[in-house]
Amino acid sequence: MALLGKAVIPAAGRGTRSLPASKVIPKELFPLIDRPAIQYVVEEAVAAGCDDIAIVTAPGKEALAAHFAFDPALEAALRSTGSAAQLEAVRHASALGPLTEILQDEPRGLGHAVACAEEFAAGEAFAVLLADDLLDERDPALATMMAIHARTGASVVLLIEVPRDKAQLYGSVDALRVDPAALPGEGGIPSDAEIHHLTRLIEKPAPGEEYGTLAIVGRYIFTPAIFDALREVGRGRSGEIQLTDAIDALARRALAEGGGVYGLVFRGRRYDTGDKLGYLKATVQIAADRPDLGPDFRSWLRTYVENRGDES
Ligand code: UTP
């Protein structure tokens, strides 16, 4: 089965929810313990088989690609001080690169950021991963999404189940459950995978306008037809080019014309680092699970919470 080689990571947004910390440091570079958020998603893309990765960046966000660049002076210094673990950590990050940089000159929305990757995609299907939406590496989803794409030829998005009163925060989807065994071809999809065929999507619906409780999160596989769809939809809500509007256009289009959209429901561990509380929770959860820090951190955290009593 052909795996997708290309992945695009849009990271050119303003990060307004994380201001003032994101004024100079891109929120995609905020550390979760000792790795910046973007490194987690690049590692996820590589683990799923992507070997050609691009970051969509903005003027002033050069540090994003620099994080993955080879730094011979730093490596030489670590070699001479004998810090083997630190040298390995630095080498690991640069071995993930170099990444292709695609410039989005102005933040005109996630849809526009994806549209900027048309030349990079060069007529092939590609994955899109958002760096403020982290999936725990123990719960991978991208490989199954790739298998759904390989077997159907359609685009694929990742879905989560949300409470109805939170549907306004996401892209909401109208969906029909599909038995994985009924998809063409074979292999690559666990038999218990919850797959839906999407018929309509709406971005951040007003209360009562949502299609249900399934919502899109930041993993996508697109056929090249997404670029025509993005051109068709133009500027939507708040003057930005909305990716969800273009996915809605694909969902209404026939498979033979590059259309068709499937959704895979994700029930694993996920960290939304784009807002302050989500970022804080992600840091605590990742630290608590790390073999090197977890035991001490969990014991400190338990004492800390107990000592605070019920001040909560
Ligand atoms: P978000 O909406 O989470 O990021 O977009 P944002 O716009 O930077 O943050 P807020 O809402 O103002 O706080 C998801 C991803 O898409 C990228 C962002 O960098 C983020 O990683 N993005 C968003 C772009 O690359 N370009 C855009 O025009 C908008």
Image (cartoon, rainbow, N blue to C red):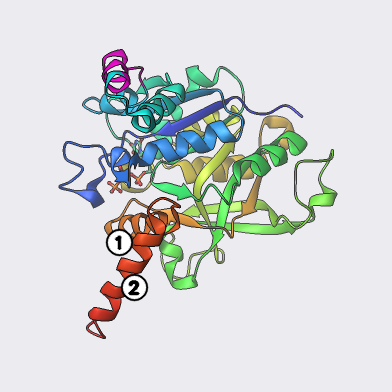
Disc 2 element: helix
Query: Is label 2's Cβ within 8 Å of ligand 1?
Result: no
Left-right relation of 186 to 174: right
The numbered dot on residue 277 is 1
Q: Is 75 included in the stretch rendered in magenta?
A: yes
The residue to which callout 2 is attached is: 302
Q: How many marks?
A: 2
Distance Cα–Cα, label 1 vs label 2? 19 Å
The residue positioned 37% from the left and 53% from the top of the image is 293
229, above or below 200, in the image: above
126, above or below 77, in the image: below
Q: Is 72 included in the stretch rendered in magenta?
A: yes
Q: Amino acid at mark 1?
A: Leu
The residue positioned 50% from the left and 66% from the top of the image is 162
Left-right relation of 123 to 306: right
Give the magenta part as a residue range. Answer: 69-79
